[in-house]
Amino acid sequence: MSAEAKVGHPGATLERPAAGCDRVVLLPEPIEEEALRLLEERGTVLLKAPSAEREDVQLLIAQANAVVLRTGIKLDAALLACATRLLTVSRTGAGYDNVDVAAATRDGIIVTSSVGANTVTVAEHAVALVLSLEKHLFELDRGVRRNDFRIRYAYLPRDLRGQVLGVVGFGHIGAQVAEMCHRAFGMRIVAHDAYLPEEIRAKYASWVTFVELEELCRCADVITLHLPLTSSTRHLIGRRLLSVMKSDAILLNTSRGGIIEEAALVDALRARAIRGAAVDVFEHEPPSGSPLLELDNVVLTPHAAALTKACVVRMAVLAAQRVVDVFDGYVPDNVANPEVLRMERWKHLVKRPSSDSP
């Protein structure tokens, strides 16, 4: 049981006093019980912030040796500078755009993520969005509810077989979406990934055609985005690329808000320059007041593509395990800044025996 302790913030709680402890884990937001149990069983001290507000986290982070980080706050350079005891930041999610990785690297902090843990879950969500748009599920549902049963004769749904799926970003999730749509629905696959090694492309050569991004936008019936948000991908899909898409194309984003220029997307949807879109991630979350909320040719979900109970537990447990690995002298999985491991402070780390894997 957590008990209130004087830890520099009246609303924070510690499992037990942390004096002299070097296994203090800061939780800016709650994590799943299974992950908490793993941390407790492995001798860590849990420092639970009263909220993920910057002021609350800043008051506590100086005491932390590790942070298990969800999406509620960004650990920028200023916050990391306060974290004088910090060894590692372990993301529960697959991305790390809410961590200043460069600043962490300068400070010798290992940054990890749960990349791969949500692959199938996010891919299933993306495919569900494709089906909801191509089969007009929400429009047909509304028709039945308003007693317009004759909407069935509008022949709104479209067959997926033979359509071209364009996958932008052919990593774990993009490749999984492509495989699902190709094998289950007989869709033809084109893909664009500027960083995919040639030997990986060769493995898919029999059923995936890799093309330049503009060509993909011109030829695809369905375009799905699976990219990290970086300086080079911010507003990657803007007015120019939207203007070359087919007028009956649909666009999906289950990766990161900001990859699509939302104002340009709104204009394209209003003008029916493309047929529809499905958006799980937004430039500003929640998207209060966004014009997207007013449109009837877009499906919106609340950054929930990875948020099945099983997936959330899986990601949190893996994040907790990576913290324990660092504390126990092992190289954690999925290090975002591997160059930090060359620092003197980390030369003692060894590979964890496979029999110890969670």
Image (cartoon, grey):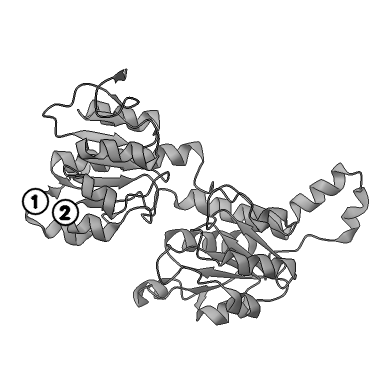
Residue 254, how many percent across, how many down?
53, 57
> Which of the two residues, 60 or 1, is positioned nearer the viewer here?
60
* Mark carried by residue 345: 1
* Quarter of the figure that contains the C terminus: top left
Residue 235, how many percent across, how many down?
51, 69
> Which of the two residues, 337 or 199, is positioned nearer the viewer here?
337
* Quarter of the figure that contains the N terminus: top left
Determine the residue positioned at 60% across, 75% down.
239
Mark nearer the N terminus (2 vs 1):
2
- Residue 295 lies, with reference to residue 190, above or below; the image says above
> Which of the two residues, 308 or 353, is positioned nearer the viewer here?
308
Residue 273, how many percent across, how many down?
72, 73
Give left or right: position of 135 versus 238.
right
Determine the residue positioned at 33% across, 50% down.
113
Q: Amino acid at mark 1?
A: Arg
> Which image quarter: residue 17?
top left
Residue 95, how many percent across, how many down?
39, 54
Q: CA distance from mark 2 to mark 1?
A: 8 Å
Give left or right: position of 316 versus 209.
left
Residue 193 visible? The answer is: yes
Give left or right: position of 101 versus 107.
right
Give left or right: position of 118 versus 243.
left
Q: Are marks 2 and 1 in contact (CB under 8 Å)?
A: yes
Determine the residue positioned at 37% across, 44% down.
92
Determine the residue positioned at 21% across, 58% down.
105
Q: Amino acid at mark 2?
A: Gly
- Residue 172 lies, with reference to residue 214, above or below; the image says above
Identify the element where label 2 is drawn: loop
* Mark carried by residue 108: 2
